[in-house]
Image: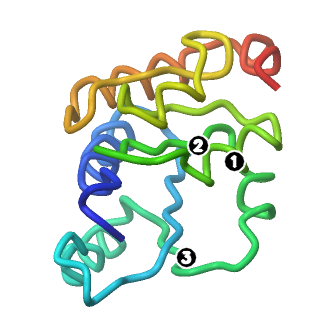
Amino acid sequence: MLKDKGVREFAQAAEILKSKYEDLKFVMLGDFDEENPSTIDRDELVEWVNNDVIDYKGFVRDVRPYLAKSDCVVLPSYREGLPRIILEAMSMSKPVITTKTAGCRETVEEGLNGFLVAPRSVQELLEGMEKFLKLEQSEKKLWA
């Protein structure tokens, strides 16, 4: 649960989208690294969960069941190598919304298998997520 992974931007975008669209669910996976200064405050996460913004699952060994239920994977990271979660999502034919940062931008062909947004931009992340939501179901399946 690192700030550098864009979890705050994700939660902010999720909160806005949930107020506009019915039946959206935003799931967050991952553990806390108390030694890492970029770890978000637990109280912040608890607030997101209590306000029904995020469904937090914590650390999971096998992401495949969660990916299988997902329509899209969102990783608004500030910096990455080659993100494993994006590779896992792509291996399961899941569209990806991620940032135009090194490592992330190399995985997505804009409009073909996902969307790229500016890092640290809630507005661009929101626009990318909404662009995906507005696709017809048949268009979403073309990405699979």
- Residue drawn at the location 49% of the way across and 53% of the way down: 26
Q: Quadrant of the N terminus?
A: bottom left
Amino acid type indicated by mark 2: Val
Q: What is the distance, in whole Å, between disc 1 and disc 2 at their CAs?
A: 7 Å
Residue at 26% x, 46% y is: 9
The correct choice, above or below, for 33 with respect to 95 in the image is below
Residue carrying label 3: 57
Between the C-alphas of marks 1 and 3, the distance is 14 Å
Residue contact between numbered discs 1 and 2, judged by CB atoms under 8 Å = yes
Residue to which mark 2 is pinned: 73
| Place of residue 66 in the rendered image (x, y in percent of width and height, measured from the top left) | 72, 61
Q: Residue at x 67, y 12 (%)?
A: 112
Nearer the observer: mark 1 or 2; the answer is 2
**C-alpha separation, residue under disc 2 versus residue under disc 3:** 15 Å
Pick the front one: 30 or 38: 38
Above/below status of 35 relative to 26: below
Q: Amino acid at mark 3?
A: Lys
Q: Which mark is residue 70?
A: 1
Labels 1 and 3 touching (C-beta < 8 A): no
Q: Earlier in the sequence, mark 2 or mark 3?
A: 3
Callout 2–callout 3 Cβ contact below 8 Å: no
Q: Secondary structure at mark 2?
A: strand
User: Label 3 crowding class (10 Å Cα cut-off): few <14, some 14-19, many 20+?
Assistant: few
Give the left or right position of residue 37, taking residue 124 as reference: left
Q: Which mark is residue 139?
A: none
Q: Quadrant of the C terminus?
A: top right
- At mark 1, the secondary structure is loop
Look at discs 2 and 3 and give the one toward the viewer.
2
Q: Position of residue 36 (x, y in %)?
A: 25, 80
